[in-house]
Amino acid sequence: MSHDTSRRDFFANPRMPLMAGLAVPVGILSTLAAFVLIHLIHLFTNLFFFGQFSFADRSPATNTLGLWVIAVPIVGGLVIGLIARFGTEKIRGHGIPEAIEAILFGKSRMSPKVAVLKPLASGIAIGSGGPFGAEGPIIMTGGALGSLLAQTLSLTAAERKTLLVAGATAGMTAVFGTPLAAVLLAVELLLFEWRPRSFIPVAVACAVAGFGRAVWFGTGAIFPLETGQPQMVALFSCVVAGLLSGMLASALSMALYKVEDLFAKLPLHWMWWPALAGIVIGVGGYIEPRALGVGYDVIDDLLHQNVLMQVAVGLLVVKAIMWVVALGSGTSGGVLAPLLMLGAGLGVVLSRILPGADPMLWPLVCMTATLGGTLGAPLTAIVFGFELTHDSHAMLPLLAATLTAHAFVTVTMRRSIMTEKIARRGYHIFREYGVDPLERHAVREVMTAQVQAVDASTPLVTVLDAFFGAGQTHRAFPVVSEGSVTGMVDRASLQRWMDAGRLRTVGEAMVGETVEVALGTDTCQQVAARMAVHQLERMPVVDGPRSRKLVGIVSRSDLVRPLDTHFHEEHQRERFWRPRPGSR
């Protein structure tokens, strides 16, 4: 039995080392951008709430402005609206949908304005009390840096995508110290493929950012936590927590876009919407100051059960309203930190009633499940929850609850918070992907091996009579000279050559013309793509690029034949054991 040694598990990509090398500066630049963004947030927080030019990390909740605190987010919203109106509209929103849209529909091109204005606008938005996280803006900013580097070089759109995603995920790594979750975010949300050519450079950028983060932000988990070993009954509790987290994720997503619809109906230019949302943020910040800003300290208190139940419920209601209204207005800011806080709040409530585990486990579980359900990225959320806390005992509960939440959301909602905005712009994104059946099969498996060929020395008139007469069997035929393929002939080209009058044989007509050929080892997907690019309906198959000996011919209808097997695998139901008639 002969073995095919030409097929590989993955496509060979000689440019992958180059892309991995380019991912190193992308990781460094994204880490620097994260450093700048965090310090911009600190600076604007001090300016807006304390009147000080300082980069010290201070919570806006400690301000002493009284009623004047209501004005601060309004001023911030006005500034953001002006930046978006006269700078670039791309800074609006929470970053990830915009990155996805650039990848899928913009050939991964992002402008220098985004790289500069996105962190500036986000620093102002969060620094003036906006209830956002820094992760969305840094994903957009890091992605813009990767895209800009790619645009200065001679790279393909696919390679630009790789560097854009590398920058985005490196930025996330620099902010949270979660390189594995960042790589999974790339796989589940941004790359839309699972290939070493893109996965490895992204992982390199995240590794660089992970090491670089230690220089400016230190090492260790952001929210270190250690819970006890859960009991068997905790599995039931995880399912309950997952379902409720999925409901919360669905409710937040629906509320967000309802609010966005309400803003769209206002008889005002969208430039003024962030200022209107600032009124709600200001009032909410006056009622509950801890709802202002990023709120990492609040998340830490919720995870460690350092907040009274009544206080936690009030805080989370206010935070949810502020976040939904602010994000629905198009203000620049991230979604991860608010979702972590809201999910952790749900866990605080459930910790009083769910059995089988340490009460501190449930804020972490609900936080992670809410994030996974909302983003539609469960594996990212599970690893993210672990890397944020380093709580190894939580892994199984995180897995059970997050996948339950994800299942609930995928059944009950058509789109996620990540894709709804893109869908409203007229683009549909299908989040599932798998191995293309056309990539699994080689051309030699579907080609026609018995081929009628035209010898290059045959006169044109003879070819017309013998191959394109009343007994014509095919629309086109390969032309061979001494066994090597020189071209393809069809009725239209043959008639054009005959009308020219000076050509006698098919070989003379083929001089100077190029012919696309396929190898038997090419995949059906590769050849189908080339047929589409060159607008061909069939292609001769040769034994090698040099000898070009004809071994077959493949048509469009041949290439889609593997889809028939795929269709039956998906739809044909079979039973391998059938009871005999009359048996009991």
Image (spheres, rainbow, N blue to C red):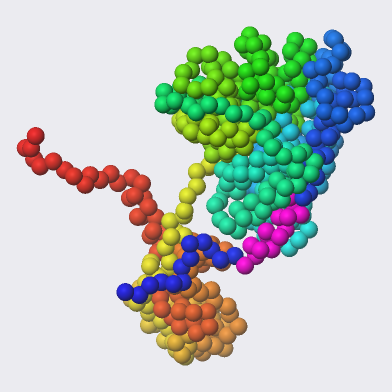
- Can residue 209 be seen here? The reply is yes
In percent of width and height, residue 85 lies at 82, 33
Residue closest to the eye, 153 or 422: 153
Q: Which residue is drawn at 74% across and 33% down?
A: 134
**Above or below for 306 versus 158:** above
The quadrant of the picture occupied by the C terminus is top left
Quarter residue 3 falls in: bottom left
The quadrant of the picture occupied by the N terminus is bottom left
**Above or below for 436 versus 12:** above
- Write the start and end of the magenta stretch as one range: 14-27
Q: What secondary structure do most residues of the magenta stretch adopt? A: helix
**Above or below for 13 versus 413:** below
Residue closest to the eye, 19 or 89: 19
Drawn side of residue 415 relative to residue 29, left or right? left
**Above or below for 148 versus 388:** below
Q: Is residue 20 magenta?
A: yes
- Can residue 248 be seen here? The reply is no
Residue closest to the eye, 319 or 379: 379
Count of marks placed on residues? 0
Drawn side of residue 372 relative to residue 582, left or right? right
Q: Does the magenta stretch include residue 133?
A: no
Quarter residue 94 falls in: top right
In percent of width and height, residue 526 lies at 51, 64
In percent of width and height, residue 464 lies at 43, 81
